[in-house]
Image (cartoon, rainbow, N blue to C red):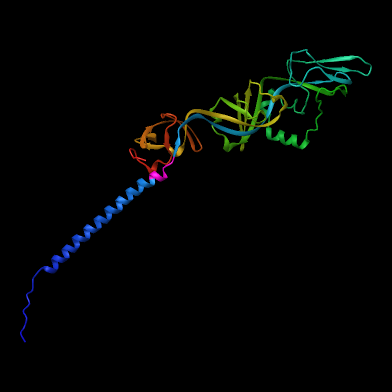
């Protein structure tokens, strides 16, 4: 048998390994590029699908505080000068001058006694029992919560005269009151942790619950703020008449302590760039940056200036970047 000769070629194994390593690096690079491309492409696709916008609109943002309180007026109660049958000469809510005939009382003997207004003001034939307790000269001592509790416990046991029908009255009984509403007062009380910016204000607007939503808030001036433990009591002075206010005593109200007019947006739309505040807007489907000035903030809303009404504003700006086509 003939022996075969074999020739050994040096270095072939090492060369094959080097080619395998180069191929591995190339494969990894391709995979990474594919992943990055997919990531960027997916991010752009996600931005197109997930981006949220609102249309910029101009309005007034109000910051309000809902409170309970008591109305205080200068009230002059008139008693019957004699016993007899009562007949009203004016209607409830009618404004009368001093000395004006308000009612007539016909005695058992047939004589007629005229009862006149002791001062100018609004004639109110209903009494609630707080006329002597609640007067403008005692505003610093008024505790609305305590008075309301007292009123609920007594369950309105005071004497009243109502309407225009004739009725028999006794001498000394209360007939009506004359209310002077220039000025009048609202004393409100609330928990101290809701003491928001009122200490910085001198004037506010008040919307009373009894007036209805269609009635515009009235201007009021803060004349006193006092704090005791966890309660804050604020005295508001008002000059403007609110329809039917003379009938009310305890009422809820919204204190409007801040107002700002401008473009109202969700706070999430704001972005900070180079130490300035701005927003992303869409112009011809392209993301554009616009610098804005923040005028007021309240909860999750802001009032800004710097963009025109009607522009779509992106409210989740972390998904996009300037110049991106959406």
Q: Is residue 46 above or below residue 190?
A: below
Q: Is residue 54 above or below residue 261?
A: below
Q: Residue at x 25, y 55 (%)?
A: 30
Left/right of residue 255 with respect to residue 117 in the rendered view: left
For the residue pair 32 and 305, the one nearer the viewer reads as 32
Q: In the image, residue 80 lies at what x, y percent?
A: 84, 20
Q: Is residue 313 above or below residue 20?
A: above
Query: Residue 140 occupies which quadrant of the picture?
Result: top right
Q: Magenta stretch mostly in which secondary structure? A: helix
Range of magenta residues: 47-52
Residue 50 is a magenta residue = yes
Q: In the image, residue 180 lies at what x, y percent?
A: 71, 19
Quarter containing the C terminus: top left
Q: Residue at x 6, y 83 (%)?
A: 3
For the residue pair 1 and 60, the one nearer the viewer reads as 1
The residue furthest bottom is 1
Q: In the image, residue 308 lies at what x, y percent?
A: 42, 29
Q: In the image, residue 43 lies at what x, y percent?
A: 36, 47
Left/right of residue 33 with respect to residue 309 in the rendered view: left
Residue 218 is a magenta residue = no
For the residue pair 91 and 258, the one nearer the viewer reads as 91
The residue furthest right is 109
């Amino acid at each position: 048998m003939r022996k075969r000769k074999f020739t050994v070629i040096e270095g072939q194994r090492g060369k094959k390994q080097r080619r395998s390593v180069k191929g591995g690096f190339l494969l990894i690079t391709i995979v990474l590029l594919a992943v990055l491309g997919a990531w960027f492409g997916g991010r752009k696709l996600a931005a197109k699908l997930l981006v949220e916008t609102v249309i910029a609109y101009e309005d007034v943002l109000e910051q309000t505080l809902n409170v309970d309180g008591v109305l205080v007026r200068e009230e002059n109660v008139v008693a019957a000068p004699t016993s007899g049958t009562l007949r009203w000469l004016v209607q409830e809510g009618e404004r009368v001058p001093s000395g004006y005939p308000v009612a007539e009382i016909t005695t058992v003997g047939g004589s007629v006694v005229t009862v006149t207004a002791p001062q100018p003001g609004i004639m109110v034939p209903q009494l609630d029992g707080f006329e002597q307790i609640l007067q403008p000269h005692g505003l610093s001592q008024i505790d609305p919560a305590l008075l309301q509790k007292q009123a609920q416990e007594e369950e309105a046991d005071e004497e009243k005269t109502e309407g225009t029908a004739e009725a028999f009255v006794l001498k000394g009984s209360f007939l009506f009151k004359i209310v002077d509403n220039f000025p009048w007062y609202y004393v409100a009380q609330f928990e101290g942790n809701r003491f928001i910016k009122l200490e910085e204000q001198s004037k506010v607007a008040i919307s009373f619950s009894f007036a209805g939503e269609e009635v515009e808030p009235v201007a009021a001036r803060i004349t006193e703020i006092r704090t005791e433990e966890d309660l804050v009591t604020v005295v508001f002075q008002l000059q403007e008449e609110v329809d039917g206010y003379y009938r009310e005593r305890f009422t809820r109200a919204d204190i409007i302590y801040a107002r700002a007019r401008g473009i109202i947006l969700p706070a999430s739309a704001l972005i900070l760039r180079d130490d300035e505040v701005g927003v992303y807007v869409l112009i011809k489907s392209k993301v554009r940056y616009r610098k804005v000035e923040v005028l007021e903030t309240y909860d999750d809303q802001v009032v800004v200036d710097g963009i025109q009404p009607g522009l779509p504003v992106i409210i989740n700006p972390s998904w996009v970047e300037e110049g991106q086509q959406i």
